[in-house]
Image: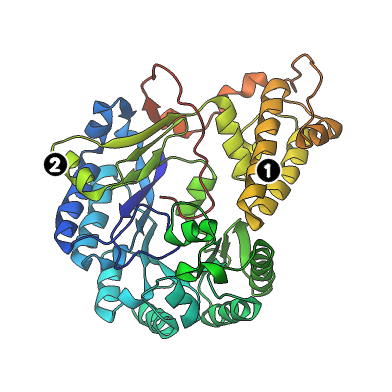
Amino acid sequence: MKLGIYIQVPFCQTKCTYCNFHTGVFSRALYDPYVNAVCRELSEHAALCRAVGIELHADSLEADTVYIGGGTPSLLEPAALARIVEEVPSAFGGAAHEITLEADPETVTPEKAAAWRAAGINRISLGVQSFHDAELKAAGRMHRRADVFSAERTLRDAGFANLSFDLIAGLPHQNSESWSGSLTELLALRPEHVSVYMLEIDEGSRLGREVLLGGARYGAAAVPGDDDIASFYELACERLAAAGYEHYEISNWALPGFRSQHNLKYWRREPYLGFGAGAHSFNGRERWANAHDPAAYVAAIETGRLPIEQRERLSPQQALEEELFLGREITRTRNFSEQTAIAIDAEVKKIVTTAMKRSEKILKQNMAKLHGLANALLEREILDSDEIDKVLRGEELPPAERRTNGQDEQNEARKNPSEQAVKVKPEPAAAAGSSIPKPKKIQ
């Protein structure tokens, strides 16, 4: 079974104002012990998981993608990154065909770029965010516009033929003119892959808290409104499509042949294992996450213990809700009738796209629709168009006997293949709630 490997490096030079990840500024004295711990977690993953009740059939698992994210993993010495990359095939066998490193533009040097390529890294995800210095400064970014052009040229000269650029729609001081300008400059450099993320306003970031409080620090008063951010997203859709990019996920575009194979695993609900502080793992039926504090993570690994901080077994309804939310076409894995599946796939795509283009309030409202739809599907399996409309309007369907399309005998054959490769010991009770991933780089 092929799976993805995610390596979390939580170290940053500074904390961006909009960041709500478990990352931060730490002493460089922690870097080497942290890398040692990650390598040990990789090499001893089966035993560490078994000790907490998670059985991994390591002999049948091979890593075909590796994603090193953060944080700013490009802060690590190239030799440290090379150690991590080398440890993956030793732990899992096989050869990863896609190995991605997240990097900030100002950290890219010719020496580092050459060392990354020599280590086998073949894809760089560059945290551009904007091509306007005023927006970058307000967001607390360390780089400036000129650094993006310098980093791109350095990476191309080093032989990287697969670059991904991130942009954020909704930064303080951003307007339609500056957003259009950022898109123009990005398209001039023509990276193979583009991610556009909409600014998240929540309690998890300094900027988010300030906006919610109605304050002005961190440029909070200059954050564009929801309608403006939605128009930025729509313009990105138009411009990227016109330039030949395929819109294959809500936040991601790629030139033909350059879709992120690792990120697709998240959207397809395929198995992945995360290593490092705060890293998440998924086996098809259960999710778990390591402790997010780097020092606590290192201390636990050094004593031979996996510091699981979160753990959740998914109910059938939670699993179906995730499939719907993530835009996974249910015709591939469920035994619903073709007519029902096609109708639902079309409605879900509209719901999710609208939600992600609008506010958190709209997202919650639309998630409630998906919850009702999943419940109705599990009860009936066949829904006609009138019934789908009623469910999406929040109306209850009248009691009815369970209807199927005569394909129940195919259920076992259509199980998520990840469940056949990764086994989990039963828990006393299923965890409540569902942690549906947001459409951005996981972790």
Give left or right: position of 320 versus 143.
Answer: right
Q: Which of the pair 61/437 is nearer the observer? A: 437
**What residue does disc 1 label?**
366
Residue plotted at (64% across, 48% down): 361
The percent coordinates of residue 320 (x first, y second) are: 60, 32
Pointer 2 with pointer 1, Cβ within 8 A: no
Residue 241, image quadrant = bottom right
Q: Secondary structure at mark 1?
A: helix
Q: Residue at x 61, y 35 (%)?
A: 321
Secondary structure of residue under mark 2: helix
Q: Residues within 10 Å of mark 1 (few under 14, many from 20)?
A: many
Where residue 22 appears, x then y in whole percent?
A: 35, 52
The amino acid marked with disc number 2 is Glu
Q: Which residue is mark 2?
A: 302
The three-letter amino acid code for the residue at tag 1 is Asn
Question: Residue 159: in sight, yes or no?
Answer: no
Cα gap from disc 2 to disc 1, whole angstroms: 44 Å
Q: Residue at 14% x, 41% y: name it.
A: 302
- Residue 260, relative to residue 392: is it above or below? below
Residue 107: give x, y in percent of width and height.
31, 74
Q: Along the line of sight, which residue is nearer the eye, 340 or 197?
A: 197
Q: Identify which residue, 206 or 342, lies in the foreground.
A: 206
Q: Residues within 10 Å of mark 2 (few under 14, many from 20)?
A: some
Outermost residue to the top: 401
Asked if residue 403 lies left or right of residue 131, the reply is right
Q: Is residue 108 above or below residue 309?
A: below
Q: Quadrant of the N terminus?
A: top left
